Image (cartoon, helix red, strand yellow):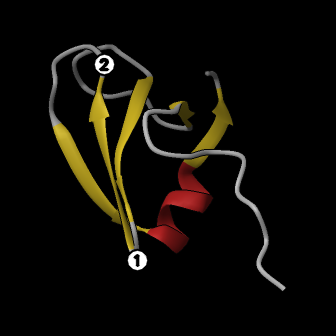
Amino acid sequence: MVEKQPFDINSIVEMKKQHPCGENRWRIIRMGADIRIKCEGCGHSVMLPRKEFSKKVKKVLE
């Protein structure tokens, strides 16, 4: 059985650690085996393995 994640493409999530630019809101821009997120403050994007992303996400905002 496939478990449904509470997030999808274009969801805004809050991570446990703040980005160096001072922002803590990230937009999911790609999903697959890896998840790419983009900082809402400075536009920097980061790609994380799904398992690591699940550990680092704090909550889904939008």
Q: Residues within 10 Å of mark 2 (few under 14, many from 20)?
A: some
Q: Where's residue 3, x and y in %?
A: 79, 71
Three-letter amino acid code at disc 1? Ala
Q: On residue 60, which mark appears? A: none
Q: Residue at x 40, y 30 (%)?
A: 26
Quadrant (top left/top right/bottom left/bottom right) for the N terminus: bottom right
Q: Nearer the viewer, residue 55 or 30?
A: 30
Picture quarter containing residue 5? bottom right
- Spatial separation of the CA atoms under disc 1 and disc 2: 22 Å
| Total count of labels | 2
Q: Nearer the viewer, residue 15 or 35?
A: 35
Q: Nearer the viewer, mark 1 or mark 2?
A: 1
Decide which of tag 1 and tag 2 comes sooner along the chain.
1
- Whether residue 28 sits left or right of residue 57 in the image: it is left
Q: Residue at x 24, y 25 (%)?
A: 20
Q: Residue at x 61, y 60 (%)?
A: 55
Q: Which residue is mark 1?
A: 33
Vertical order, 25 against 53 (above or below): above
Q: Where's residue 6, x and y in %?
A: 72, 47
Three-letter amino acid code at disc 2? Glu
Q: Which residue is mark 2?
A: 40
Local secondary structure at mark 2: loop
Q: Residue at x 16, y 18 (%)?
A: 42
Local secondary structure at mark 1: loop
- Whether residue 57 sits left or right of residue 48 in the image: it is right
Vertical order, 42 against 2 (above or below): above
Q: Residues within 10 Å of mark 1 (few under 14, many from 20)?
A: few
Q: Where's residue 62, x and y in %?
A: 61, 21
Vertical order, 55 against 28 (above or below): below
